[in-house]
Amino acid sequence: MIDLRSDTVTRPSAAMLQAMMTAETGDDVYRDDPTVNALEAEAARLSGKAAALFLPTGTQANLVALMSHCQRGEEYIVGQQAHNYKYEAGGAAVLGSIQPQPILAAADGSLPLDVVAEFIKPDDIHFAPTRLLSLENTHHGKALPAAYLEQAWHFTREHKLALHIDGARIFNAVVAQQTTLENLARYCDTLTICLSKGLGAPVGSLLCGDADYIERARRWRKMTGGGMRQAGVLAAAGLYALQHNVARLQTDHENAAWLGQELQKIGVEVTEQQTNMLFVRVPSDQVNALGQWMKSHDVLMSVGPVTRIVTHLDAERPVLEKVLAYWRAFLAQHRPDAAVNTSTLSASPYAGR
């Protein structure tokens, strides 16, 4: 099966599984797991932060991050399409009693700072106090410009806000901009890193920040059910990913660009390609038929009027060549008058991530 719905679908390689099988373990709630400790130390080193915390999921990492920044009744400013606002079941509001203030992102994925300034609440009993600006890097595949990150950093210092980066795919930004994680992380107070997307681990995310912040986060992790015991078998996968699967992200970016160029040649409308994400426009009378066609050829895609395709380590160039051939054959056989069920034209709502 070829799966292009997301880079979350990757499976551990044989070498990663071997690292997991031979991992030294202990009780991480007691801070006794040497492999977890090594993973957290490596994340802190790479990000230039004082400390890091290993969590089971990206959603929990973002929730813990927000709850460690904001108290009940306080507010964070966030993008309207940001994952930690739109795609995490309202956890910040439901579990943290934290009010989100969403705003529209600019075309490059950044949140315009003049607009952010308009939504910072004054010191007034009628308003939830604004405590945090949350950015996403990458956002729909777009790496936030380094100059913008520096501006956002100084802006938040001026306005006495903390700055958090949802860095689920921040290593895609690192590779695309030919920089280091530390160079990007210097312009935020805290950041999350997902190990189970393009980096290929089966599970896990990291939260990085200063030592006091991570101690608060450790308490919230426990309260939200993220304290794990012999978690070294999972942390070993994350360590392997950081050591072996970062530089190869460039291959994913090149594959996405190649596929976009080849699809354009056969008449597919490509609207955008950024890092490992490709967005194409599918005519409404082809949406259902294309999805069914691809599935019949063992290709999983979240087909909609705007379809996102995500390249990853389990979808290398030979695999994409097959997808291109299937798409070409589909276009050759598709009849414009084929029956279409318009009730299912939209892709999965999770396809945005």
Image: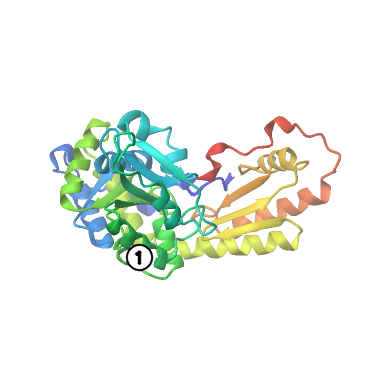
Quadrant position of the N terminus in the picture: top right
Residue 84, image x, y percentages:
41, 42
Q: Nearer the viewer, residue 160 or 138?
A: 160
The residue nearer to you, when weighing 105 against 249, is 105
For image coordinates 57% across by 48% down, the residue present is 4
Question: Does the rendering let one see residue 228?
Answer: no
Tell whether 86 sits left or right of 201: right
| Residue at screen point 50% across, 48% down | 104
Q: How is the image coloured?
A: rainbow
Above or below, 290 against 278 in this view is above
Q: Is residue 32 visible?
A: yes
Is 344 rendered above or below residue 46?
Answer: above
Q: Position of residue 188 (x, y in %)?
A: 30, 57
Left or right relative to 274: residue 232 = left
Q: Is residue 336 above or below residue 193?
A: above
Residue 346 in which image quadrant: top right
Which residue ends up furthest to the bottom in the rendered image?
Answer: 178
| Displayed quadrant of residue 222 | top left
Residue drawn 62% across and 53% down? 279
The image quarter in which residue 77 lies: top left
What residue is shown at x 27% (from left), y 33% (from top)? 72
Query: Where's residue 208, x and y in %?
Result: 26, 52
Q: Amino acid at mark 1?
A: Glu
Front residue (pair 216, 93): 93
The residue that disc 1 covers is 150
Residue 100 percent location from the top left of the image: 39, 39
The answer to whether residue 133 is above or below residue 142 is above
